[in-house]
Amino acid sequence: MQKALNYPRSLWVLCIGTFFNRIGGFVSVFLVLYMTSRGYTPAQAGIAASAYGIGSISAAALGGYLADRLGRRNTIMLSMFSSAVAMLALSQANVLWLIIVLVVFAGLATELYRPASSALIADLVPPEQRVGAFALYRLAINLGVTVGSVVAGILASSSFLMLFLGDALTSAIFGLLILFALPSDRRKQVELSSRQSNFFQAVLPDRRFLLFLVAGVAVAFVYLQQLSTLALQVKALGLSNTVYGLLLSINGLAVVFLELPISALTSRFSRATMTALGFLLIGLGFGMFAFASTIPLLALAVIVWTLGEMVQGPVASAYVADLSPEHLRGSYQGAWGMTWSLGLVLAPLLGAFVYTWSASGFWLLCALLGMVAAMIVLLTVRSKIAPEQANNDSPASLVDVGVRE
């Protein structure tokens, strides 16, 4: 905790703003309930909800590019103020096609800030402090989501309109906080923009990073089964929705209370090694569902993959920052975020299909994917750095498999 107090003021501004923003980030969660309450069919509501994922995938690429071109601060403000407008407009939409269009825009605007925030963290702290800084940022997100779930339940019981107004308000608060409390980084971005390339030109030549992204998509697919097929598994065992909620609460509480101390330990070791360990634990945890048939065993499986999440979460983001040149940090963080957006789309579609074919086989496949992803990450350590990485200002780009001094 003492180390956290020594972080730059700008990092605390970012984390506080993120906390308030995530308190209000509940419209996407309640969108299906909102639409069915207005007379739309579950299928129509599902289409609208999936449109948010389309917007978030676009936000990862565009947000990374804008973070490198316009600056981290300007991109976050653009994201937050646009998100507020999107939520207000969505609250008044009453035609299906317009709702879908606005949901895509909401997904784009709301998620646009993520690459810029991650790049800003990498800018603010030296390599040896990045794991702890990303852990603090993730704590702000998880605390906000935890508080927001309670607030959302209260607001939704009163009026769905209050959900949209609350989401718009918290986005505006984050934007104003960045506007008035975060110093401008525009001069530095102008100096770096002479080396700027578009998103795909920045990422595609780096084969080492592309391998890492492949591993990320595989793990995201596995991890996000908690939002779809895990519920089917709990139901298939004859257990109630309360049990499913309890399992997810174990994950949330553990991340809030344990991720910071765990990150203090993992920061002593190689980024790649800890990321691979986290990927492996996520795969093994979900693989345990093939054999878990009681509540204690289900809880144990959740604990295993939650441990994997806490190990790899801050470290993986720091590893991406290590791999990226300074003028492309936004693009690299955007590409990393895109793996999770793709996982959010693929997990329920492919996961449910394979699960209905063979439940136990599906969970064993998750374990296999986790192991393969871990091996891919370790493979990136052995590969040579691409020529484009020669100007990386971070000494951590030469990651080895040993202990950090």
Image (tube, grey):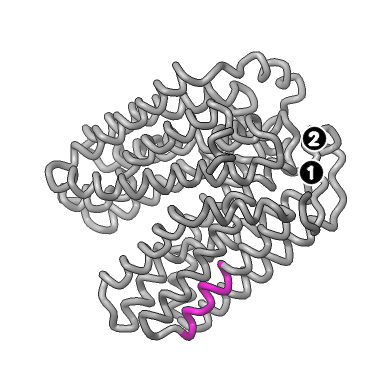
Task: Classify mark 1: residues with Cα within 10 Å, few (<14), some (14-19) or many (20+).
Answer: many
Task: Classify mark 2: residues with Cα within 10 Å, few (<14), some (14-19) or many (20+).
Answer: some
Residue 381 found in image quarter: bottom right
Whether residue 87 sits left or right of residue 371 in the image: it is left
Extreme residue in the front direction: 2
- Of the numbered discs 2 and 1, the one sitting upstream in the chain is 2
Q: Is residue 63 visible?
A: no
Badge number at residue 109:
none
Q: Which residue is mark 1?
A: 397
Query: Measuring 48% from the left and 28% from the top, which residue is drawn there?
Result: 13
Residue 166 found in image quarter: top left
Callout 2–callout 1 Cβ contact below 8 Å: yes
Looking at the picture, does residue 14 appear above or below residue 160?
A: above
Residue 172 found in image quarter: top left
The x and y percentages for residue 142 are: 42, 48
SS under mark 1: helix
The x and y percentages for residue 138 are: 50, 46
The x and y percentages for residue 351 are: 47, 69
The verdict on residue 315 being magenta is: no
The verdict on residue 283 being magenta is: yes
Q: Which residue is mark 2?
A: 392
What's the residue type where badge 2 is placed?
A: Asn
- The stretch of residues the image draws in magenta is 282-291
What's the residue type where badge 1 is placed?
A: Ser
Extreme residue in the top direction: 187
Query: Measuring 60% from the left and 34% from the top, which residue is drawn there?
Result: 121
